[in-house]
Image (cartoon, rainbow, N blue to C red):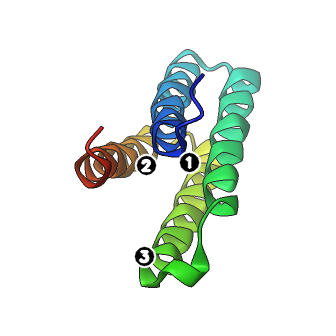
Amino acid sequence: MSDDPYLLILKLYEGLLKYLSFVKAAMESGDIEAKFKYINKSVSIFDELRNVLDFEGGDVSYYLDGLYLYQIETLFSAGIDDNINSVNQVMKVVQGLIEAWKEETGL
């Protein structure tokens, strides 16, 4: 792993996509234990992303905090309802975050 904080954030976003794909696969196969295991891993990554926000840096941190919290809520609801469309929406948001992060950081 790298000490580059920008690369670490990118790896967290990429890890989210990986775990969210596992959530979808678990939903499709009816594996309740795996579904919640990977939802919890995804939520842990969102929590870590929230922990590293710099609120003294401006409004973007507040926006991201709200966005991350909403994704967490969406995942919990999706897990209860087996809503793959909601998981797809979270994945779409994360993909957008990856693209924006790469553009902003030049990665």
**Which percent across, then down, holds residue 104?**
28, 55
Three-letter residue code for mark 2: Val
Q: Secondary structure at mark 3?
A: helix
65, above or below 43, in the image? below
Tell which tag, 1 or 3, sits nearer the viewer. Answer: 3
**Which percent across, then down, holds residue 53?**
60, 66
Q: Are marks 1 and 2 in contact (CB under 8 Å)?
A: yes
* Mark sitting on residue 90: 2
10, above or below 31, in the image? below
* Mark sitting on residue 60: 3
Q: Secondary structure at mark 1?
A: helix
Tell which tag, 3 or 2, sits nearer the viewer. Answer: 3
Three-letter residue code for mark 3: Val
Quadrant of the image for the C terminus?
top left
Closest to the observer: 103 or 71? 103
Query: Which residue has dot 1 on it?
Result: 78
